Image: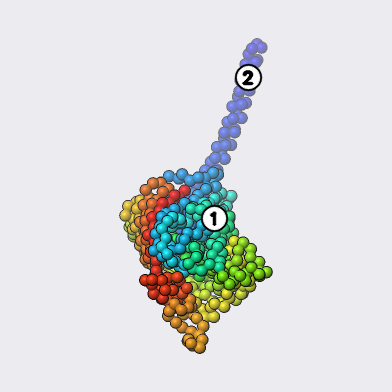
């Protein structure tokens, strides 16, 4: 009887355990059923939203990733370097180039060579050609869901020179040439990237597939995103005028291609997209002025179009100090920060129209921008701080008594010969009005020659590129750009000042380049 009593008690305990487990499983099943219903509801909501391509202007996470716009199709396998929604990505571009009229390589500038004919283009150059097809960079970005359909996002990106390892520092390359004549200068280039730790991007924000994306921090201008997406050469330094110069993407000055202290909002409504962005003034004697930009665009049956308007105050175009200014700086009490440069200051207003059309293996591109540069309403004083902690020692606040009107046109086509091979051709044209001040010898204040940078002038360039993606993450390329400036746009150029085989009103250059790029 004792044995039977123990057995009955054991069966009672087992029954109690089974009943408890059954109750727990029923509760878990009810929770899973509710979770499944919620997921199906969200799935149906998301399926009704338009899909945004990675290179589209509406994708804030892709806005600072120019290589995405250049890729022909998404990779079949996701092998990104990601952990818990945080991804490391990058681009390394190195080539070999020849320039019949160039300048020595600069280890600081993001575009370290004169791929486009420039003032100090003088003797020939043959050697390494870094950042020819695209700028090298490394970045860290993240996207984490914090509520149903709401994501927290961030992006940190640092551009660098692969041949030297230096962070891209355009203004530093300008200051490096202070006091030097054209024959002694290397290939400097003004830029919005001035040696900052995250010189390409440093922003965070919130993103919703329904309500759009709001980001704040250091991020590219809307006009810069448009250049990346609608340039047939995808913002290349060696094969694109608007990629090398940066003024088109910066609404008149390359230092405004990336905004500090900025807020940006993007939203898609069906096939139509809207975006606004503003940069807030640093205050005081600062070269970071207020900026406002707006964009409206759409996609329809392979056709994409965007219209953008911009207003930028206290835009700065940096240049090396003259030898006399360097002497004056040595005895001056003006603060120099990380380095001092000369600068032309202006208030810029621009309007841009861009379009592209895909038909089978062919993509057609076109764009136009009209930029009005006027004297600043808030003149800068010596010592004004600009990008990256540099200062303006010699500001010119009166260069545009008559507004300078710069018009930029471009067109091109890309042909996918195969899934892994693209051929691209592009044409670029710029012209400016005559905006010099009248005087006794020229009372009308107009001219069409190279005697003044204020005379009317033109720039023309034609480029060709073959890009072969021979392996995953790798592509090899070969291309060439011919560029020429005339009249006012050739003022101060070494080639326009009496070198053998040249004339005083024009200067030109070619830059055949081959290279290899790795993207991850």
In this rendering, the label closer to the viewer, 2 or 1: 1
Q: Which residue is mark 1?
A: 167
* Residue at 52 percent of width and 52 percent of height: 165
Q: How many marks?
A: 2
Viewer can see residue 508? yes
Place of residue 378 in the rendered image (x, y in percent of width and height, measured from the top left):
61, 74
Picture disc at residue 350: none
Q: Which residue is mark 2?
A: 10
* Residue at 54 percent of width and 59 percent of height: 169
Report how far apart the C-alphas of labels 2 and 1 lie in the structure.
Answer: 74 Å
- Mark 2, residues whose alpha carbon is within 10 Å: few (<14), some, or many (≥20)? few
Place of residue 386 in the rendered image (x, y in percent of width and height, measured from the top left):
60, 65
The answer to the question of whether label 2 and label 1 lie on touching residues, with beta carbons closer than 8 A, is no
> Where does the N terminus fall, quadrant-wise?
top right
In the rendered structure, which disc, 2 or 1, sits on the residue that comes first in sequence? 2
Q: Secondary structure at mark 2?
A: helix
Closer to us: 390 or 346:
390
Answer left or right for 499 relative to 81: left
Place of residue 175 in the rendered image (x, y in percent of width and height, measured from the top left):
56, 64
Closer to us: 413 or 46:
413
Answer left or right for 155 relative to 9: left
In the displayed orientation, state which residue is furthest to the top.
Answer: 1
* Residue at 66 percent of width and 12 percent of height: 2
Place of residue 107 in the rendered image (x, y in percent of width and height, measured from the top left):
51, 57
- Mark 1, residues whose alpha carbon is within 10 Å: few (<14), some, or many (≥20)? many
* Residue at 46 percent of width and 44 percent of height: 79
Q: Secondary structure at mark 1?
A: loop
In the displayed orientation, state which residue is furthest to the left.
Answer: 417
Q: Is residue 517 above or below residue 484?
A: above
């Amino acid at each position: 009887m004792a044995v039977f009593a123990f057995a009955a008690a054991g069966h009672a305990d087992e029954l109690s355990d089974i009943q408890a487990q059954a109750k727990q499983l029923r509760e878990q099943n009810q929770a899973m059923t509710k979770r499944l219903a919620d997921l199906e509801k969200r799935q149906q909501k998301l399926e009704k939203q338009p899909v945004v391509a990675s290179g589209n202007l509406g994708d804030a996470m892709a806005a600072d990733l120019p290589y995405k716009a250049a890729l022909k199709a998404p990779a079949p396998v996701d092998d990104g370097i990601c952990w818990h929604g945080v991804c490391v990505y990058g681009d390394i571009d190195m080539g070999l180039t020849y320039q019949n009229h160039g300048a020595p390589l600069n280890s600081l500038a993001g575009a370290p060579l004169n791929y486009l004919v420039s003032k100090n283009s003088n003797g020939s150059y043959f050697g390494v050609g870094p950042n020819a097809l695209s700028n090298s960079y490394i970045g860290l970005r993240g996207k984490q869901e914090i509520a149903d359909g709401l994501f927290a996002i961030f992006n940190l990106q640092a551009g660098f020179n692969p041949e030297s390892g230096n962070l891209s520092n355009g203004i530093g390359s300008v200051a490096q040439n202070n006091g030097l004549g054209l024959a002694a200068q290397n290939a400097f280039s003004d830029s919005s990237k001035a040696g900052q730790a995250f010189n390409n991007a440093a922003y965070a924000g919130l993103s919703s597939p329904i309500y759009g994306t709001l980001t704040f921090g250091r991020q590219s201008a809307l006009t810069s995103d448009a250049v990346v997406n609608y340039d047939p050469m995808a913002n290349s330094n060696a094969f694109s005028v608007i990629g090398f110069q940066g003024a088109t993407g910066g609404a008149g000055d390359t230092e405004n291609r990336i905004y500090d202290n900025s807020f940006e909002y993007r939203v898609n409504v069906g096939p139509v997209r809207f975006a606004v962005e503003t940069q807030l003034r640093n205050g005081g004697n600062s070269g970071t002025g207020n900026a406002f930009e707006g964009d409206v665009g759409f996609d329809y049956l392979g056709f994409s179009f965007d219209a953008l308007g911009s207003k930028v105050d206290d835009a700065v175009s940096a240049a090396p100090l003259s030898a006399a200014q360097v002497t004056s700086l040595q005895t001056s009490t003006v603060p120099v920060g990380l380095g001092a440069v000369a600068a032309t200051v202006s208030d810029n207003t621009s309007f841009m129209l861009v379009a592209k059309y895909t038909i089978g293996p062919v993509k057609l591109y076109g764009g136009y921008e009209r930029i009005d540069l006027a004297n600043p309403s808030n003149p800068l004083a010596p010592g004004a701080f600009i990008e990256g902690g540099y200062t303006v020692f010699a500001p010119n606040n009166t260069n545009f008594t008559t507004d300078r009107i710069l018009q930029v046109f471009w067109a091109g086509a890309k042909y996918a010969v195969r899934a892994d091979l693209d051929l691209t051709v592009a044409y670029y044209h710029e012209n400016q009005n005559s905006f010099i001040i009248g005087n006794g010898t020229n009372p009308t204040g107009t001219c069409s020659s190279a005697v003044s940078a204020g005379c009317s002038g033109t720039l023309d360039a034609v480029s060709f590129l073959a890009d072969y993606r021979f392996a995953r993450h790798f592509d090899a390329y070969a291309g060439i750009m011919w560029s020429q400036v005339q009249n006012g746009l050739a003022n101060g150029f070494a080639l326009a000042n009496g070198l053998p085989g040249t004339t005083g009103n024009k200067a030109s250059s070619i830059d055949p380049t081959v290279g290899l790029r790795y993207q991850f």
